[in-house]
Image (cartoon, rainbow, N blue to C red):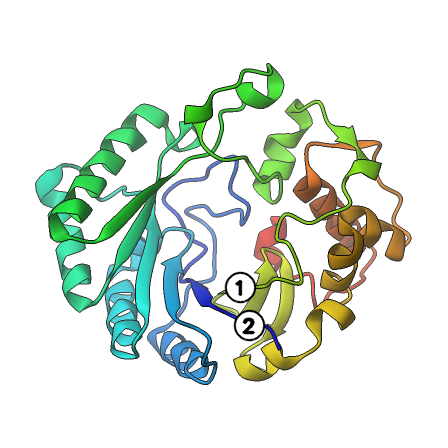
Amino acid sequence: MVDLESIHLLLTYKCDGECDHCFVWSSPRAPGTMTLGFVEETLKQAGEVSSISYVCFEGGEPFLFYPLLAKGVELASKNGYKVGAVSNAYWANDDRDALLWLKPLVELGLTDISVSADEYHGYEESSRLVANASRAANELGIESSVLRVRAMKCYTEGVENDDDGGSIFFRGRAASKLAPQVLGKPSSEFRSCPEEPPNIGRVHIDAYGNVLFCQGISMGNILETPLKDVLSRRLCEQHPVIAPLASGGPAALAKHNGIRTKRSYADACHMCYDVRCRLRAKGLLNEILLPDQSYGD
């Protein structure tokens, strides 16, 4: 059985932005938002998995559905979980506004917040909003962190800057918009998966019920199979996508399915995403390579 430590609820795929590096293709037009009943059912099923100690609300932009986010935080906290949220802090226009939005959530049980700031969010403006949100979190006594990814110049011009943040994962919209700008590496080099299966410590669950090992790779659906049973399967030995990734990364996934790949890729995620897109185009593994949202459909 997968020893799951946390679940991350993709409260919505909708977002006020449309960032080029977004691996779930979020946008103002994206469908797929949870209902209160779905949040309640998800937390109920999570309660049947004793190893889970943390619940995080993500998106898209979860603050777009603030009443639902607030109720979700309250329910998760009452069920004994540490509770986090991820946001681009569009709501933190100044210090008072940041407190206005965050304080009710903290009172309901929010224990930490992660906010995004980099050139893909509009760097100068996002940095100001994130600074406001971080100060508010500090004043309210909860943990806060800033999520940044490296600027494209690090990939296209070889400019190294440790302050630019973590690596881009070239999947989803990033595979389409950004990866073609990168001088790639040979496909034969990608023999491991960044998600490091079989060590699955977290999963994402979306509004369609998909339990996602990684965006676009479903382990099962909680609307059809209880979460505890999804996790009890011998996933890393039997799953048609996770098993090859665990044994030899994207290269093994391509070989296992007879997929002819490109000569080079921006990173392992780019190769994996391309292989999965080719499988979908052939009508293969349609019950696993979900949801369509993660593939820009």
- According to the picture, the residue beneath numbered tag 1 turns out to be 201
Residue occupying the far left of the picture: 96
Q: Is residue 225 visible?
A: no
Tell me the crowding category of disc 1: few under 14, some 14 to 19, or many 20 or more residues within 10 angstroms, Cα based.
Answer: some
User: What's the mark number on residue 3?
Assistant: 2
Q: Position of residue 289 (x, y in %)?
A: 69, 61
- Left or right: residue 183 versus residue 221 is right
Task: Say which quadrant the N terminus sits in.
Answer: bottom right
Seen at 63% across and 51% down, the residue is: 295
- Mark 2 and mark 1 in contact (Cβ < 8 Å)? yes
Q: Amino acid at mark 2?
A: Asp
Q: Nearer the viewer, residue 117 or 237?
A: 237
Seen at 89% across and 44% down, the residue is: 260
Seen at 27% across and 67% down, the residue is: 73
State the SS at label 1.
loop
State the SS at label 2.
loop
**Disc 1 or 2, which lies upstream in sequence?**
2
Seen at 83% across and 52% down, the residue is: 252
- Left or right: residue 80 versus residue 225 is left
Q: How many numbered marks does the figure carry?
A: 2
